Image (cartoon, helix red, strand yellow):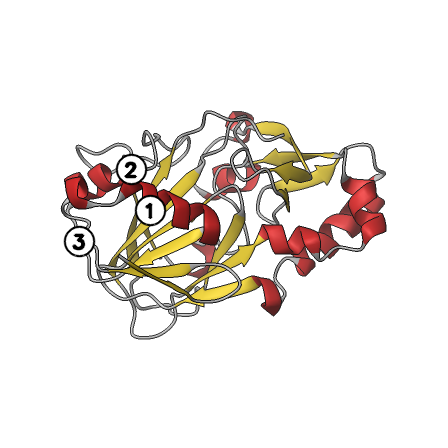
Amino acid sequence: MNVYQVGPVGAVITGIDLRFPEKIPVNEIKEAFLNYSVLIFKNQELDPAGLRNVSLIWGEPLIHPVFKGIEDYPEIIQIQNLGEKYHTNAHWHSDVTFEVEPPDATLLYAIEIPDQGGDTLFSNQYLAYEGLPNALKENLESKLAVHSNLGVVILSGGDAKDAKEVDHPVVRTHPVTKRKLLYVNRLFTHKINGLENQESKKILAYLCDHIQKDKYVCRFAWQKDSIAFWDNRSVLHKPDNTYWPQLRRMERITIDDTTRPY
């Protein structure tokens, strides 16, 4: 197994065939996962059963609360473009933060990719937190923010009354590394509790601009049969959707949800 760091977040792993989970050095993979937050594996030919088997390294696959899974594999959702107006994931986000216990990790597998565009960008939220002014860190330390999936529910054709809402810390502590990180995102975070609306909007806008600075971000250009695992607690991600009308088709699994953010 070889590990190559690719930027402020992320590493490419070579020398492993994910079709044979019994041969995977699990402890080394998990250590790299905590160190780099995003792991990329290329040239991995996986069917849905193989994809699910690989996900078990990280934990139990989850059923997505909004989108239906593929046939025979309800934990695997297919992500593909349906036109510009239907991009539910066009902003920086961490997956499913509108749940009380959001997923610990996400797995994404490339089935079909466009000739250009379609990259995924990842942002290191440890570094984003560390890069904040000290006064702002202190101000945010004990703050909670409202996370909701209202926009996604409406865009996917659901009823607004089925939307979920939960409070999470603005500054989260990773349950394994114990490092502090920013835990807000433009897609799901709606308001910082305890602040006037205008002040909340101002700070959230600042934070959401802050996290996308180049010094925190790595861009991954997909190839067919590539697979990415990322720590849904310590990174945000965002797709480059500038490929329409070409097709980008991926399969995704989110994993484990045993820890409420604190």
The residue lying toward the viewer, choosing from 182 and 93, is: 182
Kindly report the distance in space between the C-alpha atoms of the residues bearing marks 3 and 1: 15 Å
The three-letter amino acid code for the residue at tag 1 is Glu
User: Residue at left 19%, top 49%?
Assistant: 18
Judging by the rendered image, the residue that carries numbered circle 2 is: 57
Q: Position of residue 151 (x, y in %)?
A: 55, 42
Q: Position of residue 227 (x, y in %)?
A: 29, 54
Crowding near pointer 3: few (<14 within 10 Å), some, many (20+)?
some
**Earlier along the polypeptide chain: callout 1 or callout 2?**
1
The three-letter amino acid code for the residue at tag 3 is Asp
**Earlier along the polypeptide chain: callout 3 or callout 1?**
3
Residue extending farthest to the bottom is 116
Q: Is residue 141 left or right of residue 50?
A: right
Judging by the rendered image, the residue that carries numbered circle 1 is: 28
**Earlier along the polypeptide chain: callout 3 or callout 2?**
3
Judging by the rendered image, the residue that carries numbered circle 3 is: 17
User: Residue at left 49%, top 65%?
Assistant: 218
The correct choice, above or below, for 129 with respect to 193 in the image is below
The three-letter amino acid code for the residue at tag 2 is Ile
Picture disc at residue 223:
none
Q: Within the image, what quadrant is residue 142 found in?
A: top right
Kind of element beneath mark 3:
loop
Question: Looking at the image, is mark 3 or mark 1 nearer the viewer?
Answer: 1
Question: Looking at the image, is mark 1 or mark 2 nearer the viewer?
Answer: 1
Query: Looking at the image, do the residues carrying marks 3 and 2 touch, with CB atoms under 8 Å apart?
Result: no
Q: Within the image, what quadrant is residue 68 found in?
A: top left
Kindly report the distance in space between the C-alpha atoms of the residues bearing marks 3 and 2: 14 Å
Q: Position of residue 59 (x, y in %)?
A: 34, 32
User: Residue at left 76%, top 34%?
Assistant: 143
Q: Position of residue 112 (x, y in %)?
A: 24, 61
The residue lying toward the viewer, choosing from 41 and 113, is: 41
